[in-house]
Image (tube, helix red, strand yellow):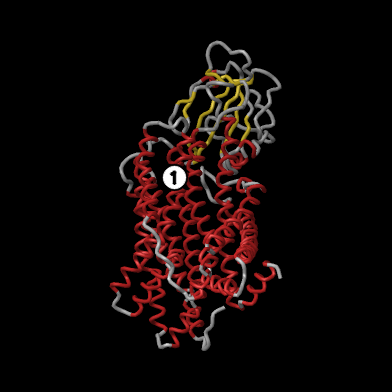
């Protein structure tokens, strides 16, 4: 019998609770895959917006030069861009004076406008029709005027007008101001191979950092899915090793079971993301919602996620087999594994120590390009996440030893001993909230305050609002990971220890004591690791603060603590009926 068939028979032979364990892994991978596709799509969406807005940002070099008395060779038009505040919404007006016929227009425009002609975006045309009057500074657009297509718009609700002028019209030669109160001179243009708007570059940078804040916890969560019900699986595989199974067969069975379940979960997650796209497109950032197509990252990226997550789960499962392969008798005897080393904490401290130097480098313009600086920051944030995950089990084991020594009740003694015996399992329950705490600490201090804005800087106001929206989105994703992780690992932990729970109950331990021990096993590490990760995130963010601490930035911190604590406790309480059911088993036996 080959390894795959044997793995399938053992999975089916695990009974209803064995299938529940597989379902938990599938659910964890589905959530992780769905949110990973979303994190990838965010960058694709901002890149798409930046590309569609480039045509209105002609640089003062390359294919465009500032208007002077002498027309440069090759100039095909004069372009001027300005912004208006239209009832709290941004109105972008692009003026053209065409100097040569047959100029290829940018995508989204059928042609460049003739003198006196006005082209409106659908949202602006609808607004003017609803108001019944034209907008100040714009000539009236007669019925049937060309509309600006989606290819020239940042988002579906964007207000954009394209106005045509005669080459000698003084209106087109005036210097104008955008909504960041910057003066923008008109330019001669030779084409539309332009650069991205400064605002678009800023959004792309923020999206890169936000992706790092979301992707690494999701990868950790996805990898941890392979370790759900790990004790039950290790006992089963250790028994097979003791009766003659080779290490290669054990590894092959583990990979087959983990990868098949994970692949089904990743496909389910990708399908669920496709269903959620129309709803996600209504989230407003940058002044409006998204084109649904923006949130589709492309089939290659989706396939990469669908294939990478099962691969990650398979690798994680194989890494966790070291004890089974090397010491199957120790696993069968339930020996406490050797303690972890302090080097895990040293790695975290070393990564955090880099952030102050990185902040100095950013302030002194050491990096040749802002994109490089943002990339380095994103990588360091990702490393910090990984090191928090690396140090977490060591800290949990330390907490367990302290709790065991100070315990005055049976429940606290059970909780402390369990933390010492299997700190990795306890860490998986609270790791989601710890990651969320790091995210909240990092972005909480970086959130700009209202006082940092110029009075007439509507673009700055919009950016401030979008950062708050982005903060909510990132924290929401983190909360989903934290609560899903807590609920799934709490259930799988009880399935892992159902024989132990049942034997303790048969020996006379009240269910209330077991329940309190289960709670303490979660809440004590949650309080310590949650606070520690928030402090670590805040420390990492401090070097990048533009000014002093922003009181408004404390709001995400407080909300994350409250929601994370309540969410994890509620998710843990969902496993209470399962605890009651496993303790009622009159003849507990291992798988």
Q: In the picture, residue 570 is in which quadrant?
A: bottom left
Left or right: residue 587 versus residue 453 is: right
For the C terminus, the quadrant is: bottom right
Is residue 414 positioned above or below 168 on the image?
Answer: below
The residue drawn where x is 57% and y is 48% is 40
For the view shown, which residue lies furthest in the front direction? 244
Is residue 456 positioned above or below 64 on the image?
Answer: below
Q: In the picture, residue 354 is in which quadrant?
A: top left
The residue drawn where x is 60% and y is 73% is 240
For the N terminus, the quadrant is: bottom right
Please name the residue that numbered disc 1 is placed on. Answer: 380
Is residue 390 positioned above or below 179 on the image?
Answer: below
Left or right: residue 234 versus residue 263 is: left
Question: SS for tag 1?
Answer: helix
Q: In the picture, residue 27 is in which quadrant?
A: bottom right
The x, y position of residue 146, in whole percent, is 68, 34
The x, y position of residue 212, in whole percent, is 49, 48
Give the crowd class for mark 1: few <14, some 14-19, many >=20 residues within 10 Å: some
**In this orientation, which residue lies closer to the viewer: 588 or 540?**
588
């Amino acid at each position: 019998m080959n390894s795959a068939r044997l793995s399938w028979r053992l999975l089916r032979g695990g009974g209803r609770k064995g299938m529940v364990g597989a379902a938990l892994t599938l659910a964890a991978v589905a959530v992780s895959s769905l949110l990973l596709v979303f994190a990838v799509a965010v960058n694709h969406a901002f890149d798409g917006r930046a590309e569609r807005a480039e045509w209105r940002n002609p640089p003062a070099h390359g294919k465009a030069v500032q208007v002077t008395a002498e027309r440069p060779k090759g100039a095909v038009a004069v372009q001027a861009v300005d912004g208006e505040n239209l009832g709290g919404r941004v109105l972008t007006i692009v003026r053209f004076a065409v100097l040569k016929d047959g100029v290829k227009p940018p995508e989204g425009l059928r042609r460049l406008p003739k003198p006196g002609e006005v082209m409106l975006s659908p949202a602006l045309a609808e607004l003017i029709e609803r108001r019944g009057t034209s907008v100040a500074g714009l000539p009236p657009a007669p019925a049937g005027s060309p509309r600006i297509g989606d290819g020239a718009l940042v988002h579906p609700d964007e207000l954009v007008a394209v106005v045509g002028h005669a080459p000698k019209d003084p209106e087109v030669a005036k210097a104008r101001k955008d909504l960041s109160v910057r003066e923008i001179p008109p330019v001669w243009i030779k084409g539309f191979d332009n650069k991205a708007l400064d605002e678009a570059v800023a959004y792309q940078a923020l999206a890169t950092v936000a992706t790092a804040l979301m992707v690494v916890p999701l990868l950790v969560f996805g990898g941890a899915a392979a370790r759900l019900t790990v004790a039950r699986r290790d006992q089963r595989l250790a028994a097979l090793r003791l009766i003659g199974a080779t290490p290669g067969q054990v590894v092959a069975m583990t990979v087959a079971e983990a990868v098949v379940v994970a692949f089904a979960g990743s496909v389910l997650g990708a399908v669920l993301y496709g269903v959620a796209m129309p709803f996600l497109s209504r989230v407003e950032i940058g002044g409006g919602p998204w084109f649904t197509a923006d949130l589709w990252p492309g089939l290659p990226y989706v396939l990469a996620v669908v294939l990478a997550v099962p691969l990650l789960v398979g690798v994680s499962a194989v890494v966790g087999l070291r004890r089974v392969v090397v010491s199957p008798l120790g696993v069968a005897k339930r020996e406490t594994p050797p303690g972890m080393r302090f080097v895990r904490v040293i790695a975290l401290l070393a990564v955090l120590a880099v952030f102050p130097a990185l902040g100095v480098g950013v302030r002194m313009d050491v990096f040749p390009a802002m994109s490089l600086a943002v990339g380095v920051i994103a990588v360091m944030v990702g490393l910090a996440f990984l090191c928090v995950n690396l140090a977490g089990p060591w800290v949990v084991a330390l907490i367990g030893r302290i709790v065991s020594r100070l315990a005055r009740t049976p429940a606290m003694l059970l909780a402390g001993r369990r933390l010492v015996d299997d700190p990795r399992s306890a860490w998986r329950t609270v790791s989601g909230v710890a990651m969320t705490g790091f995210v909240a600490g990092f972005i909480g201090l970086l959130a700009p305050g209202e006082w940092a804005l110029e009075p007439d800087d509507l673009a700055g106001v919009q950016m401030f609002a979008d950062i708050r929206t982005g903060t909510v989105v990132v924290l929401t994703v983190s909360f989903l990971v934290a609560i899903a992780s807590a609920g799934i690992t709490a259930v799988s932990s009880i399935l892992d220890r159902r024989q132990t729970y049942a034997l303790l109950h048969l020996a006379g331990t009240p269910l209330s004591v077991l329940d309190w021990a289960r709670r303490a096993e979660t809440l004590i590490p949650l309080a310590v690791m949650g606070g520690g990760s928030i402090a670590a995130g805040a420390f990492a963010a401090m070097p990048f603060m533009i000014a002093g601490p922003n009181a408004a930035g404390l709001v995400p911190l407080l909300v994350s603590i409250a929601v994370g604590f309540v969410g994890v406790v509620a998710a843990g309480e969902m496993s209470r009926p399962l605890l009651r059911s496993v303790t009622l088993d009159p003849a507990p036996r291992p798988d």
